[in-house]
Amino acid sequence: MGDLKLYIIAGEPSGDRLGGAMMRALRQMRDVDFRGVGGMEMTAAGLTSRFDMSELTVMGISEVLPKLPGLLRRIRETAEDVIATCPDALITIDSPDFTLRVAKRAKASVPDLKVIHYVAPSVWAWRPGRAAKMARHVDHVLALLPFEPPYMQAAGMTCDFVGHPVAAEPHPDVDEIASWRAAQGLAPGQPTLLLAPGSRRGEVRRLGGDFVATVQRLRTDLPDLAVICPVAETVVSEVQELLAPIAPPVLIVQPGDPAQKRLAFAAADVALCASGTVTLELAAAGTPMVAAYRTTWLTSQIVRRVIRVDTANLVNLVSGEKVVPEFLQEYCTVDALHSACMPLLQRDNHSGAAQRAVFEQVMTTLGRGGPSPAERAARSTLGALKPVPTSGN
């Protein structure tokens, strides 16, 4: 048994990756005994998961409702296991609909239980009341973005910015990129556009048509334009069907190999993408981009009333500059996307250079060049477990 006992829970693949890296970092610092729920990464780091994490990775009302009784049972069973384990701390990673419900039940039975949550909710964007609600059963937060700690602290939790994992990912060098392009049949100097229409079916459905039409318009200006699309595993068939009419065919990079994805990102001159985490991945690769997003009319009406930021792009949010062109809802048109992409595809363009300069700053801000986010998260966790000193007379 380790000298430190931690119960750790993740509910989706991104959280599993954070958890696995954090577990390895913690074990380099302390003798730790882990128990909890996770996926392949956390299992590889030494966790025996109580059940298959894939049970939790459901999205949307139509998917959730049939599985709701099972999810509620898992919440209850996991909370009971936390209580029975008596860990030094419960670490919950993202997936608040599951993980924080477990924390709430466990904390109700064991008020002194230390609860650490990894990935702050985006209260800076909308629903600020979530922080105060979370503070009822969370003690300490590990934040991915540098502007998040004040929001958590104002709600009564301690919080450390630990960095974003994208800043620690390896970056292919010039020779690796050139070799990859040659292997894909891309000629030296051939203009190359990367498409990233989203990882959810709704995103692909709402953005895909305009993205394809933009490619076709761009090819009237640049007939030799090559197109790369690293497709997410959740939408392979949808993306393949969407891109089939484009001739010559789009190079579709299949999911499953993160190194291939990074090479595809780095090999492109410009990206046309859905606003989201992919913007940080592209920034890490140094690839200039144009971002867009469109949701349903009803959702957009609700969001317009509660949103607290004027951009959905994480690069713009972290940098504080609107360096990445972004087109949301009715502003997402083929004319707008074409007009924004075309200058970036010109050689020696100033707008692309300006984006790359900001990308360097953003990656430094998110932790590139310093201790890895996993190491920082591990140190923050251990620091949160130290007894709070009391002042003597």
Image (spheres, grey):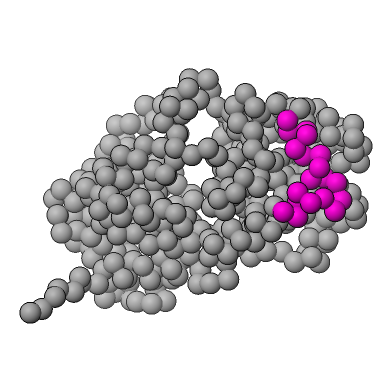
Residue at x 72% of width, y 49% of height: 288
Q: Image height check: is 20 above or below 329?
A: below
Front-most of 229 and 284?
Answer: 284
Q: Main secondary structure of the magenta part?
A: helix
**Rendering quarter of residue 233:** top right
Residue at x 44% of width, y 54% of height: 147
Q: Assign the C terminus to one quadrant of the image.
A: bottom left
Percent of width and height locating residue 340:
75, 38
**Rendering quarter of residue 157:** bottom left
Q: Image height check: is 22 above or below 221?
A: below
Percent of width and height locating residue 15:
44, 52
Q: Image height check: is 365 above or below 98?
A: below
Front-most of 189 and 54?
Answer: 189
Q: Assign the N terminus to one quadrant of the image.
A: bottom left
Drawn side of residue 29 relative to residue 168, left or right: left
Q: Write the start and end of the magenta stretch as one range.
A: 336-354
Considering every residue shown, the one lying at the far left of the view is: 393
Drawn side of residue 253 relative to residue 26, left or right: right
Q: Is residue 179 magenta?
A: no
Front-most of 90 and 333?
Answer: 333
Percent of width and height locating residue 139:
25, 57
Front-most of 208 and 69?
Answer: 208
On the question of residue 38 being in view, the answer is: no
Residue at x 79% of width, y 51% of height: 350
